[in-house]
Each structure stands twice: as C-alpha cells, then as structure tokens.
Amino acid sequence: MSADLGDIARRAVDAATGAGASDAEAWVERSTERQIRVYRSAVESLTDATSAGVGVRAFLDGRVGYAFGTDTSEDGLRAVAEAAHAAAAVADPDEYAGLPDDSGSTPVDGLFSAELSQWSTERKVALAVAIEEAARAQEGVTQVEDTVYSDGEGAVAMANSRGFADTYEATSAWAYCSAFAGEGGDRMTGLGVGIGRDPSVIDPAAVGEEAGRRAAQLIGARQPDSRRCPVVLDQFVAASFIGFIGGMLSADAVQRGRSLFADRLGDEIATPLLRVADDGTDPGGFATSPFDGEGVARRRTPLIEEGRLATYLYDSRTARRGNAQTTANAERGSYRTPPSVGTSNLVLEPGDAGFAELVSRCGDGLYVTDVAGLHSGVNPVSGTFSVGATGRLISGGELAGPVREITIASDLVSMLQGVQAVGSETRWVPFGGSVKAAPLLLSEMSVSGS
Amino acid sequence: MTLLDPDLAARAIERALSRGGDLGEVYAEDRTAFGVALDDGRVERPQSGSGRGVSVRVVAGEATYFGHVDGIAEDDLLRVADSVAQAVSGGQPRTIALEAAKAVQGHAIAQPPEGVDAATKADVLRRCNERARSAGDAVAQVSASYAENHQRIEVYNSDGVAAADDRTRVRLGVQVVARRNGTVETGHETRGGHAGFELIADDPEQVAAEAARKALTMLDAVDAPTGRMPIVVGSGFGGVLLHEAVGHGLEADAIQKEASIYAGRLGDKLAGDGVTAYDDGRRPNDWGSDGIDDEGTPTQQTTILENGELTSYLYDLIRARKDGTTSTGNGRRESFRHLPVPRMTNTFFAPGEASQEELIAGVERGLYAVSFGGGQVEPATGDFVFGVSEGYLIEDGNVTSPVRGATLIGNGIEALAAIDGIASDLSIATGYCGKAGQSVPAGVGQPHVRLRALTVGGTAS
C-alpha cells in the first residue's frame, strides 16, 4: 500500500513542476478509522471510515500555493497540481519560503501494532461495554453519558522536487468515557481516557473507574467564597495549560508578534523546576512520526529547561526568517491542510512529588480537575487569563469539599513562575494536542466564586 | 448535474439493509473551496480544495451503523454498503425504489464566488489591511482572511427521501492588534453568509474598520469588576450566550440522554413574557441557513421559547422517531464523513420593543458585554463561562470605561429567568459550532438583551 502512495506522491510532484512550479511537494495519505459508541451496554453507533487524498504545495519564485483533492487518477493529480500552481500566483512573494534545506527521517519504532488487526469488532464492542459498566459501578454515578472506543491505521507518503521521498504507517487506539454523578442541576461530569497503539493496552476497568471517580468526587459541589490561594492542577488541566503554552512557542506566532514569549529566549520564564520538551519521536505520543509535515527528520527539542526558554518551535520557513534551525515542527492535520508550525508531542518532565505530597504542601487551596474556556479566556499577547474551573477545596493539606462555578485568573508567566512543584505521576493526555503531563502545584492565584 | 444515480442509491440502500434495519440512507457530497489570507501586509496561504465522498447509514433500533469513503465510485459505495450491513443482524431485506433527488428552493446567489478572479479576493484583503491601518497610529498588526465554500449534496433514504441542496458560503474576517504604552489589545470582526461574493464586495472595508475600532477602544480598558451585577448583552454575536447556554441543551440527543437541564421542561415557564426565541434555518442568506438539512428534511422556523415558555426541542430524524414526532430540520453534519446529529441553524431571541439606550439607562452599576471571545457550557448542569472580548462598565445608566478580562459565569436556566429587557435591534452573526467532533456554520444572534444579575469574574481586586 505504501509503495502505491509513494508513487502517487512522486507523480503529483512531477505534475506540479510540469505545470510550471519551481519546486513542489506532495503529501498523500490513506487511512481507515473505526469508532464504536456504546450506551446502556448496547452499540449506539459503529463507524467505518476510509479516507484518501493528496495535498500539493507549489512554489513559484517565492510564492506558495496549496491545493488538495480526493481524485488520485492521472487527471485528478494534474488538476490538483495546476490548482496549487494557480493559487501560488495569487500570493505575494515571501523571501523565506521554500522546501526544507535538509530533508530526512528519524527511525521510530512502535508506531504500528500488528495486534490491532487481530481484534474483531465484537471484541472491541465488549471492551467499550466493559468501560461503561466499570463507570456505572462506581459509587455515586447516576448515568454514563458517553462511551467511545476508536482505532485506526494509516499510511502517509511524502515526496518533493529535491528528491525526498519516504513513507510510514501507524496505528492508534483510544477510549473515552464520560460519566455523571449526582442528580438534576447538581449533576457533575467526569472523564476517563485510555490510549495506545492497539486495544490490548487499554484497561477498560481503569478508564471506566476514572470517569466514575472523577464525577463522584464532585457530588454536592458549591460555589465557594472568592479567595487567593495556592492551586493544584490535575494532569488533564496541566496538559491543557502546557498545550496552550506550547502553541505560543510557535516561531510563527512569535515572529508575527502574537506571542507573549517574543524576545524572551534565554529568559527565566518559569521556576527552575519546570522542564518541557517537544518530542516528535516518543512512540507513546500520537503525533510521533519519522518526518514532519514538510519532510524533516523528527527530533526531541527541549523548550523550557530548568525554567529558561531554550528555543521556539520552527519549521523551515520560520527557521530561515529567525536565523535558526528547523525543529521539525511543520504539522499537518490531514491532506486537506498545508503544513504550519505547531507542537508535536509536548512532554512535561516529572518531578519527584507524589500527588498526596502536592496536596499536603498546598495546605489550604484549590484542586482543579477541569477548566472551561481556556482558549477563549486567555489573551495570547498579554497572557492574562480568566477561566472557569471545577474541582475541590484543599484544607489543611487534605482534599476537601467539591466546588464549581469558579474562575481562576492570572497570567501565564506569573503562573509558570509560580510553579512550586511538579508531580511525579505522568500520563499521555490526548486532548488539546498530545501532551504527557504531570500534576502541578502553583503558588497563590486569584480564585473568584461568590 | 447529479452526483449519484437514483438507481445506484437504491441498490446501495438495499444492500445496506440486507440484514435488516429501520432506516437506510446514502449521502453524497461534492465540495470545492478556496481561501486566502493576509498578514503583515502580505497576501499568503492561498489554497483551493476539491473533494467528493459518499456515506451509508443504517439505523436499527437504538443502534446506528455508518461507513464512508472518499470519492463517489460505484464499487466503493457498494463495498461500504456491504460493510455497514455486516454489522447489522436479525432483520429482513427489502426492495427500495427512489426518484431522482429534487433540489428545494435554495438561497439566492447573485455572484457565485468561483466566477470571481482570485486576484479580486486578494485585493479585498489588501483594502481591508489599508483601512484598518488608517484607523489609528496604535494599530500594530492586521490580518485578514477570505474563505468560500461550495457544497452540493444529495440524500436518499429507504423512506423515499430523495433531496438535493446546493450551498454556497462566503466569509471575510479581520483581526487587528493595537499597541500603546505596553498595552496590547485585539479586535476581531467577521461578515459571512449563505451567499455569493456580493456579500463581500459591498464595502468590505467596513469589517476592517469595525475590527480596528474594537482593538483601539480596548486599549483604554480598565480591569473588569468582580461580583454579581446587571448585564446588558450586545446584539449579534452576543447571541452566543443563547446558543451555548440554552440552544445546545434543547438538542434532542442531549434531551433523550437526560444530559440536559432542559429535559422534561417542555411547557415550563423559564423566562418572562416578552422572551421568545427561534431556531430558523430558512432565513434568507443567513450564515446557518440551508435549503434542507443533511438528512433531506426542509429547514424550518422552530419556536423554542414563546413568551418565556419552553415550546420545542430540536430534532433530527432518529431522535424525532424516538419521541414520536417529526424532524425540525436540524439533522446537520459537517460533511459526508460525519453522522448527522441535532444541531442549531440560526438561533436567536426575537426582537422586543425597547431600545438599546433604554436597557442601559435602567442600570445603575453593571456590565455592557458587547461581544464574546467564546464560551463553554456544561450541558448537564447548564453552567457556563464566557470570555467578554469587548465590554464596558455601565455607571448611572451610562456606558463608561471599556473593561478587559471579564468573564460571565452562570447557569442557563438562571440566565433565562434573569432576562428583564429585550431591544428591537436583531442581528445575526457568523459562528462555527463544534459538537461531537464536527464543526458546522451556525448563525448566532439577538437584539440587545438585559439580565437582572449575573456573576462577573473579573481581574480587578
């Protein structure tokens, strides 16, 4: 299959240069994804999806254009190539645009699991039902709203007019469960998540229990009085913030003046406890691949080292503009989008404090298990934010009563400089990007309730 | 030009239902798109896309089986139909006969955007850039984007539905960053519709001027207050509050799963006498309008609140069948790759009698929330939080200082009950609504609306 895709990619590149492009690049993908949603122990929906298409980037004297299509016949490829060339003619010239100077691949093991194809649909349905039942069995759970199991396998091929050509295949599997605890308007939600390269690594009991436990611990949540207090973020919430901060380290955002981290390279932007890396080679992360979205070998890039801002995230264009090296962070959503600078997998390096120790050190404060409105609530340029939050109070170093309808307000740099401890327990969190996160203890923040 | 031969559609549905099922459906789509952006004074990221695909859905009892494939090749379609059928069990096959898909009366497109030169679209962005930059010395950055989308769909199902729709949407967006003495603010404005290029060609610079005005105004903002106070919510995009805090809770999937605080509340008086609201997918050329929904049901006007009383939920075919009612034309999907789910079209409060000035004059100390940066709601509890992107203090009945960093925190049921005034100045803005991993264009709107009290999470200590 990959050999076919590689051939399509090379033919698409030839069609684009044949249409007049000075340089060209093609990304071809074919993938199949299945999703099973269960409700009350029965299948609610079952989806089988095949996706295949090609995207072409054409360069024309410093101008760049993009086009995509689903028709990979000779005529179809020519139409896409010509559309990319025509689009390029509309753009203004960009002195930094061009194919990467150094293309290549990093060998990455563990992206593809042959085990996935061994699982029948019935077995996957049983796994999803087991997750739902585990959630329902948790004390306090009144309803399991949504339980989903999904997996897929995909192949990608890339080629460019400078001779780069490579392919890779990957599999993925994930499960998600959302449970309710409590009744009526006092009902609270909890999420459970499991991910891996095939279903054998997803423990249904763990995913269901997590959803149920996270919901049940919030039963009876009230709006607390406003206060200033230290805050513990759980792994999901830490992942959301780290993911948001990672996005602001994009050299594109920095060069366009849209990041509060502009002109901060080498500065102590966080306490020395904080270490964050972008790692496109860790097989545990779903964004891992041998090459990035423009054919540059993936790597691990420390972003924040002992509190210092070590580098931004670059693709080849922003690297040229910033006199830097690409960090292989040209990302693609699918063949339908051109590459743009983004995070691959973000990894928050764990500290040595267990969760109980974080809560104990917090003393009197707030444990946050969910935030709402992060992306709308943060000003990316100033970094000030005010987000809705749900969680539990911390009293005398112990978890106490659940709280809701609160907002926490601060700014991102103050928050990073307020990191008092990083937890020792890490996990991959697949939403808001792909982040390996640990809990965080933060110094005082403004918490508003009633 | 049709996408799918009705006889092939009938054969595919027969094969999908070969092992039983209550409903079999084939959905075919052809889509072309073009977009271009401007940043730092330079036109960039021009891109065009084209794609076709087809999906097959079988509903059997409480279960839905679904498959899709890129392209509309006969072999692929029948393979997907067989694959979907394999998941079904215990039913009888049946014979299906279908007529050719008929298009309903669409929305008038005066100037199809595909017929407009790409250079003209790039020029619109350059004009917006110039207008925004001329708005004041503090304007530091301008970015603008133009996007057009032409989607043709055909839907066939085993109940005899054979419907087609032809949809063209255009959208222009401008974002301005203003900077003065270390303070940085952004302003954002969009214009879009189920319409042709004529919507963009008519004074596009006005969009840029409005984005610049917002950014420049917010430079003078003071920290937002904290606490409970009266709120006047702006017209147009202010309607996102209704969309998020009420509308999603009325979608029948949330209701049937009892995942909504509005479950079991039909007929209840949730707001005062003057409070009426609609979901209306027919409004000519509005952003969330279509001829039919993505299951072939004609779009309609649905009254969701009438004089404060909750009057209807929003249904697709499957949820309507379950409740023994008919679809309200809200079975929408992002593309052939997605299952239809109950979704809003254009959702808005009906205009009242008051003026914007009267609503504000009645507030001693409060917040005028003109526009939101976005928001989220927890459907199970109705709790919501919205970031106010443009807001002002109201003091002694007058709009005074702009404020930054305000969030509105509350609950949908409480907010409805707190409405104590509605103005007459209805307008609809363009949003993208995300649900179940799908994003669809949704019109959000309202006239100016006043709430007696809501919690403001501010930054002022």
Image (spheres, rainbow, N blue to C red):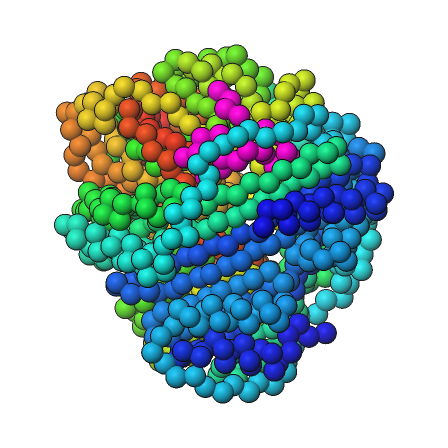
Q: Is residue B287 magenta?
A: no
Looking at the rendering, the stretch of residues picked out in magenta corresponds to A280-303
The residue under the point 50% across, 12% down is A267
Q: Return the x and y of residue A46 as percentages of the image width and height.
A: 40, 63
Q: Is residue B9 left or right of residue B42?
A: left
The residue under the point 56% across, 22% down is A312
The residue under the point 74% across, 53% down is A77
Q: Return the x and y of residue B195 as percentages of the image width and height.
A: 68, 62
The residue under the point 39% across, 26% down is A348
Q: Is residue B388 left or right of residue A193?
A: right
Q: Nearer the viewer, residue B3 or B403?
A: B3
Q: Is residue B353 visible?
A: no
The image quarter in which residue A203 lies: top left
Q: Nearer the viewer, residue B405 or A80?
A: A80
Q: Is residue A280 left or right of residue A65?
A: left
Magenta span: chief secondary structure: loop
Relative to A202, is B156 above or below? below
Q: Return the x and y of residue A260 as percentages of the image width and height.
A: 53, 24
Quarter of the picture containing the C terminus of chain A is top left
Q: Return the x and y of residue B244 as percentages of the image width and height.
A: 43, 54
Q: Is residue A316 visible?
A: yes
Q: Nearer the viewer, residue B183 or B8?
A: B8
Q: Is residue A299 magenta?
A: yes
Relative to B359, is B77 above or below? below
Relative to B13, is B48 above or below? above
The image quarter in which residue A414 lies: top left
Total number of numbered labels?
A: 0
Relative to B309, is A115 above or below? above
